[in-house]
Amino acid sequence: MSQTAVPVIAIDGPTASGKGTVAQRVADSLGFHYLDSGSLYRLTALAALRQGIDLANAPDLARVATNMQIDFQGGKTLLDGCDVGDEIRTELASQNASLVAALPMVRDALLTLQRDFRVAPGLVADGRDMGSVVFPDATLKVYLTATAEARAVRRTKQLKEKGMSAIMDDVVKELRARDERDMNRPVAPLKHYPDAYLIDTTEISADQAVKKILGLAQKSVGS
């Protein structure tokens, strides 16, 4: 099967909309590979900071993005052989990723890497521009969203479960600031495009969202 013939389910949406959890479960249900594209930007920022590189230095950040050694194994995220899964899930890492993702040179550097995840039998990719830029020919496109307040509740719970402090009002402000950056950046802005199915997870569970997407996949992917 040629790479372009491999089915892709692209799931985009704002931070803490539940797309990571949902995308992973959809991938597991279908036996597809999974790409958490947001982690690539988090990893780029982390690798750059470890090398003392300013997060506004686009050329050096692009070099880091091209050369870093990453791997996803058994639920772990490895950077140069070390598990950094918890380190890249902090609010600071999220903010740094948003800054890095706004740089065209970094996005270009990561584009090929992301597309290399497209291998048989299929791929479920989540992010902010999976259906619009990375996989514009995706078999199924979904835009997952929720209110800032609902997303803040989820993010606060996630942080506290990891032993990190979090104040609800601060999390709401940070999410809205992140949305503003992601939606208004000059390259690949976050938005709901007409060819993507809109699913609002404010009032539904992750399991319900997964069921909806699997129903859509059955019609478009044929699985």
Image (spheres, rainbow, N blue to C red):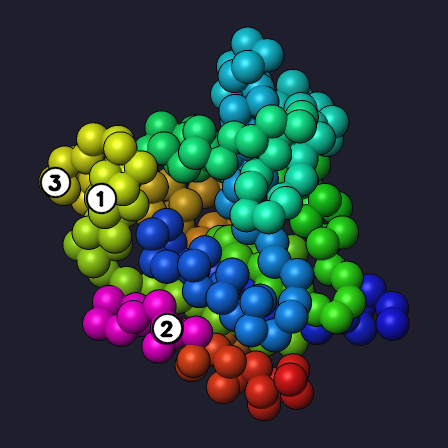
Q: Which residues are magenta?
A: 199-210
Using the rendered image of the protein, determine whether residue 104 is visible from the camera's viewpoint.
no
| Residue at mark 3 | 169
Using the rendered image of the protein, determine whether residue 92 is visible from the camera's viewpoint.
yes
User: What secondary structure is found at the residue carrying circle 3?
Assistant: helix
Relative to residue 26, is residue 114 depicted above or below?
Answer: above
Furthest residue in direction front, as rendered:
74
User: What secondary structure is found at the residue carrying circle 1?
Assistant: helix
Three-letter code for the amino acid on which mark 3 is drawn: Asp
Query: Does 22 appear in magenta?
Result: no
The alpha-carbon separation of the residues under discs 2 and 3 comes to 27 Å
Q: Nearer the viewer, mark 3 or mark 1?
A: 1
- Quarter that holds the N terminus: bottom right
Three-letter code for the amino acid on which mark 1 is drawn: Thr
Ranked by sequence position, the earlier of labels 3 and 1 is 1
User: What secondary structure is found at the residue carrying circle 2?
Assistant: helix
Ranked by sequence position, the earlier of labels 2 and 1 is 1
Ranked by sequence position, the earlier of labels 2 and 3 is 3
**Label 2 neighbour load within 10 Å: few <14, some 14-19, many 20+:** few
In the picture, the disc for residue 156 is 1
Could you tell whether 102 is left or right of 90 in the image?
Answer: right
Three-letter code for the amino acid on which mark 2 is drawn: Asp
Relative to residue 10, is residue 53 depicted above or below?
Answer: above
In the picture, the disc for residue 195 is none
The alpha-carbon separation of the residues under discs 2 and 1 comes to 20 Å
| Residue at mark 2 | 207
